[in-house]
Amino acid sequence: MKLNNQIIYQIYPKSFKDTNGDGIGDLPGIISQLDTLSHLGIDYLWLSPIMRSPQRDNGYDIADYYHIDPMFGSDEDYFRLIQEANKRGIKIMMDLVLNHVSTEHEWFKRACEGDPYYQDFFIWRKRPNELKSLFGGSAWEYVPQLDMYYFHNFDVHQADLNYANEHVRQEIYRMINYWIKQGVEGFRLDVIDLIGKDVDTGELSCTPKFYEYLQELHENTFQNHYLTVGECWEATPQQAMKICNGKGLTQVFHFNHLTLTHHGSKWNQKKLELHKLASILETWQNEYQGIEAIVMNNHDLPRLLSLWLDDQKYRKESAMLLAMLFGMLRGNLYIYQGEEYGMTSAHFTRIDQYRDIETINYYHEQLKQGVCESDILEVLAKISRDNGRVPMQFMNTLGHGFTSTTPWISFIQGGEDIYPDQTDCQVIYQMYQKIIQYRKDFEQELEHPIHFHVQDDILSFTRGTYHGVFNFSDHVYPLPEVGEVIFHNYLDTAKYLRAYEAYIYQK
């Protein structure tokens, strides 16, 4: 099976398309759009978690690994999705949360009832240490009937699994092999780098035990027959090579380039520094010999279009600039739903518009610390995970073609003109189509080393005979001599480089 230079389209099912009128996207809605997705040129369809869950963290708190959550449809709907996608040459990638389960999972319930077999499925201590949850507060929660604390690196309702227990690992392998038998051909592994954690030393990510468990997982399940990608937020090229060495995963998600505007933490934002972006892209493209995962957006991030560029006056040009830049990088290209139409961040202005637990926790913590509400909301508008979770908009109607009722989360505030038939959206979509086809027709051209150069607001590159120039500002700059134009994000040409203008050309 070919695992390189693939196009993977990510769907956040809850926000894709609702067919039963409950305001929540579902599997039949995804099936109804397969022809459009096939026309775009994708190879894989990755769905964020759809297994049974109390939805404390939008499905990343799984209560049953073997069944589809009824809010999305039935098990039979999922099997039909696999079949219908396969008919169109599209493979299905499943999102698996292996680091933790919901506290409503049968394993955890049995553990809290005092069953020693299932207690050893989790990480317990008589006294908590200083480790903090990534969602705020202590990473330890007290269970009175056991007089012990369990570890949760994320929400209190997401109990971390104990991978030192072989029975846990065997249960995970059995579950993955079940889905392989159902026709799943790819897996995205959520925060996989945490499964070898040592809570006593505080060493949580990419520990020696992690690599040991990963190799065992590989040998007992997908081996090298299926596309696998692990979420490793701060992986280096060296760590990625160790993870993707033929005995682990196909590739990893790294987000080094997507955290460049973080100032200490993601809640403090700063201006994008182009020279740092250039350095990261060049290092990964030239030094990493594996299959890089090329990603701009996902369900945990604000839209890059809104964070880095101009999502209002120059939305079309900015969206196409990003498509052109990332589309010329070697590896597997990941497209997040709506990206191909130039969807922006949510631009919410009230806390009651948000649904993300991390966002809501942060809001209340900051209020307690005396931070002005307007300042908090300004931060959330930039960086909240809900920015990537607003519903798809298929038409300019009351429910935007997503639903016939009130959606589970609001649409983009002020984004009424973002839908497929809108002229600018069509132009962005066509650019994505062309780039995808170009990657398939001229794959060998992406194998050349790439070299970036930055001057003022201009990022440029050379890759073999290909050149790119990108204006990351609304200022006007001199235009270098351009050869045969391959891609351009304006309909006409000028003698200078205009606001957010970009060229890819050959000479």
Image (cartoon, grey):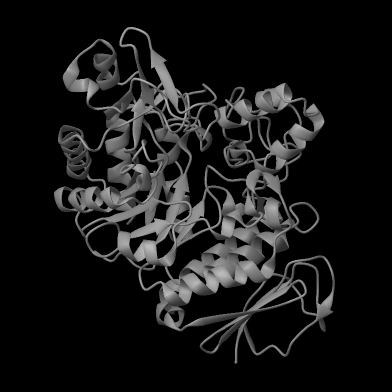
Tell me which corner region of the image, top left, top right, bottom left or bottom right, holds residue 485: bottom right
Residue 68 vs 448, above or below: the answer is above
Q: Which of the image's four quarters has the C terminus?
A: bottom right
Q: Which of the image's four quarters has the N terminus?
A: bottom left
Left of 200 or right of it: where is 429? right
Judged from this view, the residue extending furthest toward the top is 145
Q: Is residue 368 visible?
A: yes
Instruction: State the image coordinates of residue 41 (x, y, percent, origin top left).
Output: 44, 61
Left of 219 or right of it: where is 434? right
Residue 400 vs 220, above or below: the answer is above
Judged from this view, the residue extending furthest toward the right is 476
Q: Residue at x 73, y 36 (%)?
A: 413
Q: Nearer the viewer, residue 375 or 18?
A: 375
Q: Residue at x 55, y 25 (%)?
A: 23
Residue 37 vs 134, above or below: the answer is below
Q: Nearer the viewer, residue 184 or 108?
A: 108
Residue 466 vs 44, above or below: the answer is below
Instruction: State the image coordinates of residue 459 (x, y, percent, origin top left).
Output: 68, 74
